[in-house]
Amino acid sequence: MGLCGSKQIAPEYTLDVIKYKLSSYIQQSKTEKLAKLWQDQLGTNKLKHFNNFQIDDPIINFHGNQLNALVYSIYLCRYEICKFLIESCKANLKIADDVFKMEGKSIIEHCCETGDLKMVKYFLPIYYNRPSSSYRKSHVFNIPTVSLRGSDFVEITKKETAIRRACIKGNLEIVKYIKYYFKENDLEPSYDFDVHAEDEMSGENCALLVCKEGNLEIAKFLYHECKADFFKLNTRSENAIQIAVIGAKKRPFKKHLEVIKFLIEEIGVDVTYQYEETLLSASDPRIIKYLEEKLNSKGIVSARKDVIEQTCNYLIKQSPHDNEIQELLDKPVKQLEILKTLKTDISVSSISKNSFDSEDFSEVSLSN
């Protein structure tokens, strides 16, 4: 008698328990359990039991920030839960996007950066045709308001568009999907999704960006499928080869040598363009050897070691009585700003006569 044959009554939870369960189900990707929790405890007609708790209210302290369910699920790339929260629970997408904006990116930019294809497929139609906000184009390097990063998160500090974030992180499938999404739907990509768009500060398009990152696979896709321009120069008058050479110094485990070979042998980027600066910028012995061989095949017999010696001789010739400059050139200096001292149009970093016989020379940069 009594309870026999009756429907099971959902247990009553405190608000803290509700928040804990929401965050736990998001972490564990348990969409069905979250849906049941919503149905039993958090339906619109039940909010009064939890001091009018709303689905957009914070549920967890994450790296010092109070995040709501949708923001947390987007950050963790929980596609099914995101979809349920937006479509069934009517979670406010604008509130979530504002949180990501405080970190300097939009939701779609976060999805392209993390490389979750399902998330990109879901959010791309939502973001297409939205005007590109100034926060996506601007270049503010410190956003102290919100940080969703852990200590092991590799930060993209400069404000980058969605497609550029995918290129930086090497997310080829995301780049492919965005390309074919606009092609198959006969749409013109907006600024955030245009591989040909140039960064307003560096002047680099996605083609030059992947050269810097040393991503051969995306470089090939951009060249063959997107007809991206690998011949343009950035705002520092560097070509794709030079950008790849410099990028190799910061990203030594990427495929910069293979990218450089692709640029020269398949695309036909000019290896002789400012070749002295290219050699001086190189530090990888394999890249130096390859460049010297290609230059020799063009009739330019030049070694990086010779270029460094010529640079030093030029500096001494410009100021033959400057003992301070002579002393600096005689010993290793990590950051040597000769430009300021000599008032010439040459800047030299890390020159050392002792490094002339080393395979890995220090960096030297010439400005024409």
Image (spheres, rainbow, N blue to C red):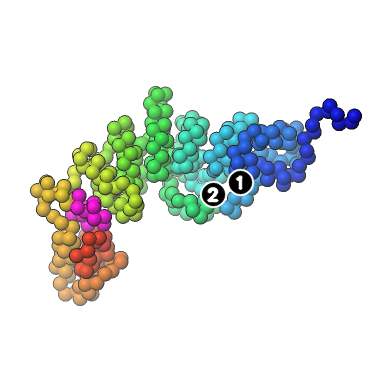
Q: Nearer the viewer, residue 218 or 206?
A: 218
Query: Quarter of the image holding residue 192?
Result: top left
Q: Which residue is mark 2?
A: 148
Q: Taking the image as drawn, is residue 127 in sight?
A: no
Q: Which residue is pictured at 22% across the width and 37% down the height? A: 266
Query: Label 2 near label 1: C-beta < 8 Å?
Result: yes
**Direction from residue 57 to residue 122 in the image, left or right:** left
Rendering coords of residue 252 (x, y %): 33, 53
Q: Secondary structure at mark 1?
A: strand
Rendering coords of residue 23 (x, y %): 64, 44
| Residue 147 is one of the magenta-drawn residues | no
In this figure, what is the number of numbered marks? Answer: 2
| Residue 278 is one of the magenta-drawn residues | yes
Q: Quadrant of the N terminus?
A: top right
Decide: few, some or many residues near mark 2? Use Cα within 10 Å; few <14, some 14-19, many ≥20. Answer: some
Query: Quarter of the image holding residue 51?
Result: top right
**Direction from residue 324 to residue 134 in the image, left or right:** right
Measure the alpha-carbon separation of dots 1 and 2: 9 Å
Marked residue nearer the N-terminal end (1 or 2): 1
Q: Which residue is pictured at 59% across the width and 35% down the height? A: 81
Question: What residue span does the magenta drawing correspond to?
Answer: 276-290
Residue at the farthest right position? 1
Q: Which residue is mark 1?
A: 67
User: Height in image: 127 above or below 319?
Assistant: above
